[in-house]
Image (cartoon, grey):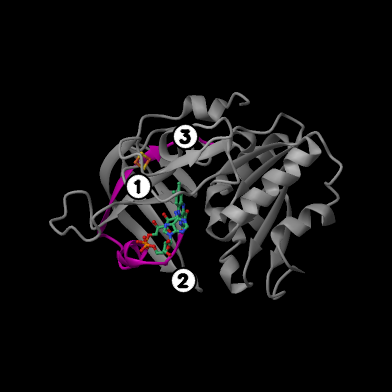
Amino acid sequence: MVASSEAALAGSPTRSDAEVVFNRDEGADNWRMRLRVPGWPRQTAPGQFAMLTPGGLTKLSSDPLLPRPMAVYRVFTEAGGAEVEFLYKVVGRGTTLLSQAEAGEVVGVVGPLGQGFSLPPSKGKAVLVAGGTGVASVYELAALACEKSEVWLLMGARSAADLGNLEDFEALPLNLEIATEDGSRGHRGLVTELMGAAGLDGEEKLTLYACGPTPMMRAVAKLAAERGQRCFVSLENPMACGFGVCLGCAAPRSDGGFSLVCRDGPVFDACEIDWENL
Ligand SMILES: Cc1cc2nc3c(=O)[nH]c(=O)nc-3n(C[C@H](O)[C@H](O)[C@H](O)COP(=O)(O)OP(=O)(O)OC[C@H]3O[C@@H](n4cnc5c(N)ncnc54)[C@H](O)[C@@H]3O)c2cc1C
Ligand code: FES
C-alpha cells in the first residue's frame, strides 16, 4: 500500500459523549449531523469512521444495543476537540434514533477508527467513484487530493433526490460527473458507466477509489484490475464493536485469509479482497 502521511498522522481515538450542534433532514432520508466531540485528535485520515451511540455512551436504555459505524464526512478542528460532520441515511432503528437527536442532546462517539485512504501521487490523476451513502467517505479525500492532483468525482445514486446536498463537493476544484439510475440528473445509468465517458479508460497512471454498494465496488475493482490501475475501496461490512474484538466484520482476502474491516480497513487495496466471496 502507498504510504499515507494522513494515516500516519492520525491520532488516538476518543471515547466521549458529543453535543449535537445540528442534525438536519436533507431529503430522501438523507441526514447531516454535526457533533462537537471532546478529545477528537488533531489529525483524521480521510476514510476513517466512528461508532455512534444515539443517546450517549452512558445512557440507561439498551436501545440500540450496539453503536452504528459512520464514515467521518468532514472535520472542523478547534481547540480541545473538533466539530465532526456525518452524512447518513435512515434505514433502520439505529439511524432512526440518530435522526431524533436534537441540538444540545448527546451522541456517544468512539473514533476516529480504522485505516484511511492513501493519497494519490503528487501531480497524479485520481478518480473517486462514490455510490449512495459511500459519498460520505470521500469528501476529505477529495479535498486533500485536489491540492496536488487532478481529481474526478463520479457520483451515483438512484435518483437526483438521493444524491443529497452536493454543495461541499461543488465548491472543490474537481471534475464532478453524476449518474442516476432513473436519469433525473446527469447520465442515466450506473456510475461505473461514467468512467468511459470521462475518457479515463486507457489511463494506467491513475488511482481509483471506490466507496458504495458492494456490486459497484466489485465492478470498479474488476475494471481497475483489467487496466492495471491502482484501486482502493472502502468496505461497509456491518460492525458490532468497531475495534477488532467481536470478529463480526470479517472480509475474505484474495490470499484465502480474512481481514477485519474495522481494524485492517475499512480501506483496502482492491486486489487484497476476494470479491467472489465478499
Ligand atoms: C465503516 C462504515 C462506514 C459507514 N458509513 C456510513 C455513512 O457514512 N453513512 C451511512 O448512511 N451509512 C454508513 N454506514 C452504514 C451504516 O452503518 C448502517 O446503515 C447502519 O448501521 C444501519 O443501522 P440501522 O440500525 O439504522 O439499520 P439496521 O436495522 O441495522 O439495518 C437496516 C437495513 O440496512 C442494512 N444495513 C445495515 N448495515 C449496513 C451496512 N453496513 N451496509 C449496507 N447495508 C446495511 C440492513 O441489512 C438492513 O436491511 C457505514 C458502515 C460502515 C461499516
Ligand atoms: S466490528 Fe468487531 S471485529 Fe470488527
Q: Which mark is residue 20?
A: none
Residue 269's x, y, as percent?
A: 61, 34
Magenta residues span 88-116
Q: Secondary structure at mark 1?
A: strand
Q: Answer left or right for 9 relative to 123.
A: left
Answer whether residue 185 is visible to the viewer in this image.
Answer: yes
Q: Quadrant of residue 246?
A: top left
Q: Is residue 90 magenta?
A: yes
- Identified by mark 2, the residue type is Asp
Q: Answer left or right for 172 relative to 83.
A: right
Q: Which residue is mark 1?
A: 51
Q: Answer left or right for 171 relative to 63.
A: right
Q: Residues within 10 Å of mark 1 (few under 14, many from 20)?
A: many
Q: Earlier in the sequence, mark 3 or mark 1?
A: 1
Q: Which residue is mark 2?
A: 29
Q: Secondary structure at mark 2?
A: loop
Residue at x 67%, y 38% (from the top left corner): 231
Q: Is mark 2 within 8 Å of ligand 1?
A: no
